[in-house]
Image (spheres, coloured by chain):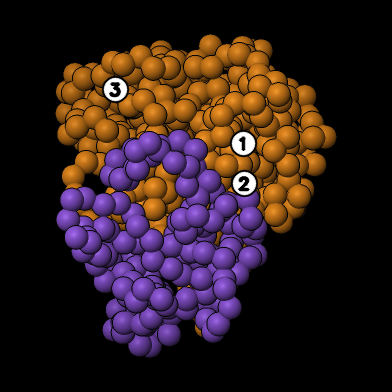
Chain colours: A purple, B orange
Amino acid sequence: MSKNRVAAAEGWFTMDADEPRLLGTRGIDSGSYFFPPSMATSANPAHPFEEREPVELSRRGRVWSLATNHYQPPEPYMSPEPFEPYTVLAVELEEEKMVILGQLADGVAPETVKVGDPVELVLGTLYEDDDNEYLVWKWQPATGGKG
Amino acid sequence: MSRDVAVLGVGMHPWGKWGRNFVEYGKVAARDALADAGLQWSDIQFVAGADTMRNGYPGYVAGATFAQALGFIGNQAASCYGACASGAQAIDLARAQILSGKCEVALVIGADTTPKGFLAPNKGERGDDPDWLRFRLLGATNPTYFAFYARRRMDLYGATSADFARVKVKNSRHGLENPRARYRKEVTEEEVLSSPLVSEPLHLLEICATSDGGAAMVLTSMDYARRMTTDPVRVAGVATITPTYPNTVIEMPNFSTDSAHGVPLPGRSFRDSIAAAAYEDAGIGPDEVDTAEVYDLSTALELDWYENLGLCAPGEAERLLNDGDTTLGGRVPVNPSGGLACFGEAVPAQAIAQVCELTWQLRGQADGRQVEGARVGVSANQGLFGHGSSVVVRI
């Protein structure tokens, strides 16, 4: 029996298997974008108390930087056993003019990724338990199509 | 009106992995700072404690904890936390108390006992805490962010791993004679580059360890200091500023930067603005700086600081390093103490320790690592969640 596919962070991204999107918010007055949506993080100081509307963020961006981790991080990271190195990308979205982090998609060799490369959002497995597969957003080299 | 306060005494417990209660380290540092100032605990009117988050409740109320450990005498106390910037905030609190006339003599203390390995978020399921979530969802450890900045230097400025390694080589030499440093061993470029990759492109020997340690300072009004000594080191400027929106550099522990959509960028990046604010407070410019203690959480980050402090233009830090300008004997030695490379990080003590070192440098008491003729020093660091920290001292 296949496991349930569950978002590891509820409401942070759409569960569209083909073209997932990160879910952010946009200030009604400022037009500024924010991510993640569910937390009291940043604000545009010209409109600190503005209403915000939910918005799907661009699926594509360019690599701002990247880091490949060769050591197992501490909890609460759910590390596969045995530990495998993994890469975290910082990706700049052109329209939103913001950088958003995310792991590099499974199976992509980090040596093939350079700063400035176009990438796009996909879903990938963060960890699994007996019943569920917990999914998170990841970045992979862009395959074409619209952003 | 001068906004200077005097650094009458400084003291540190040696950095290491001692495994004792953090209060003990703070007490040793306070004892040495008081002795250095020629004062007694009973002379202290205000205690500013820099908090630690890893040692239970006493760490959250560090001011009162240290006051109790020294014996309660009914003086005023305050505790503050700004992650790595906690120490600078405690200095700023004490300075404000003195400048407002509320007290003449203050004691600033920070100390920490740290676990082995990566700094990790607090325990428990905390799905609304970005510091917890960045580990859970991304495995974005602290070195991950350091590696982002390092990779940017390589991409933008052509920096190499060898450049980064030479920062460690320099700092390891600087710290050799420092009796309070934890690591006092010279390392070679080859040793750095052959140590295991932690967060690529950074190697194990390029990322600072976590340490136990304690640092303390006695700050007084200038009038008070002149009754005790002739030419005290002075705190001339302190910055504990936050970023200006939109901050477009990804910062620990965030998932994203601010959005620069439809808004102008600030005149300075956050890290550029930290020292600039301290310079402005002190009424000096970067060309007057003789030596600097900066937060080399990683080798590459030290190079960023050269530019953030205005010691050189963006993209020129590697040249500054390779020309020997930031080595002892050079134009503006950076991290004469050996820096975090030789100390490891004891979070709430570190920003205070930076100013302790600058004080010894300006007094000419930095045996074996002295910056000759240093009269102006600057410290810089940055705490999680957007706390800048910079202190200018002069003599």
| Residue occupied by mark 3 | B22
Label 3 element class: helix
Say whether marks 1 and 2 touch (CB < 8 Å): yes
Point out the tag, 3 or 1, that comes first from the N-terminus.
3
| Residue occupied by mark 2 | B150
| Residue occupied by mark 1 | B299
Q: Residue at 17% across / 56% down in the picture?
A: A131
Say whether marks 3 and 2 touch (CB < 8 Å): no
Up/down of B50 relative to A127, above or below: above
User: Which chain does tag 2 point to?
Assistant: B
Say whether marks 3 and 1 touch (CB < 8 Å): no
Mark 3 and mark 2 on one chain: yes
Between the C-alphas of marks 1 and 2, the distance is: 8 Å
Up/down of B185 relative to B72, above or below: above
User: Can residue B48 be seen here?
Assistant: no
Q: Is residue B319 left or right of residue B378?
A: right
Point out the tag, 3 or 2, that comes first from the N-terminus.
3
Q: Position of residue B94 (x, y in %)?
A: 37, 38
Of the residues shown, which amino acid type is indicated by label 1? Thr
Q: Residues within 10 Å of mark 1 (few under 14, many from 20)?
A: many
User: Which chain does tag 3 point to?
Assistant: B
